[in-house]
Image: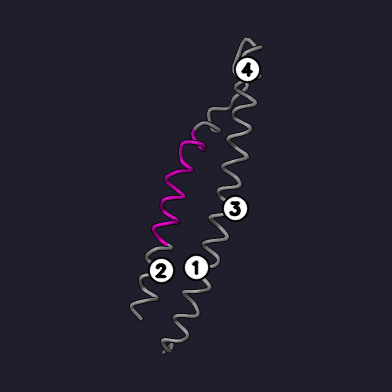
Amino acid sequence: MASIAEVRAALEQASEILRESYRSVRSAQDGLDEAVAILAESSENHHESLLPPEFVRAKERFPDQLELMVGTLERIQRLTVEL
């Protein structure tokens, strides 16, 4: 059986990994936003769109994923305090 100190340490490690993941997802979101803008602008000079529909779908999903990560981090922090 794990001690409370071990559980707290594991929760802190999970929090740090989640914060790092959040920063990576935000960076990916920024990169995709830039790519979408460039492709959308470039599409104006072509007879068909250069913007893959998957990019648009991925762009739309980022806010939900980030919200889920924030909610999870908040819950980990509350649980840590309760211990």
In the image, is 55 to the left or to the right of 7?
Answer: right
Residue type at mark 3?
Answer: Ser
Q: Which of marks 2 and 3 is nearer the N terminus?
A: 3
Judge whether 3 appears above or below 67 on screen.
Answer: below
In the image, is 20 to the left or to the right of 45?
Answer: left
What's drawn in magenta, residue-wise?
Answer: 57-72
* Mark 1 lies on residue: 15
Residue 53 in percent (x, y) is at: 53, 28
The secondary structure type at the circle numbered 2 is helix
Q: Which of marks 4 and 3 is nearer the N terminus?
A: 3
The secondary structure type at the circle numbered 1 is helix
Residue type at mark 4?
Answer: Ser
Residue 61 in percent (x, y) is at: 46, 40
* Mark 2 lies on residue: 76
* Mark 4 lies on residue: 43
57 or 24, which is in the foreground?
A: 24
Label 1, label 3: how many angstroms apart (C-alpha)? 14 Å
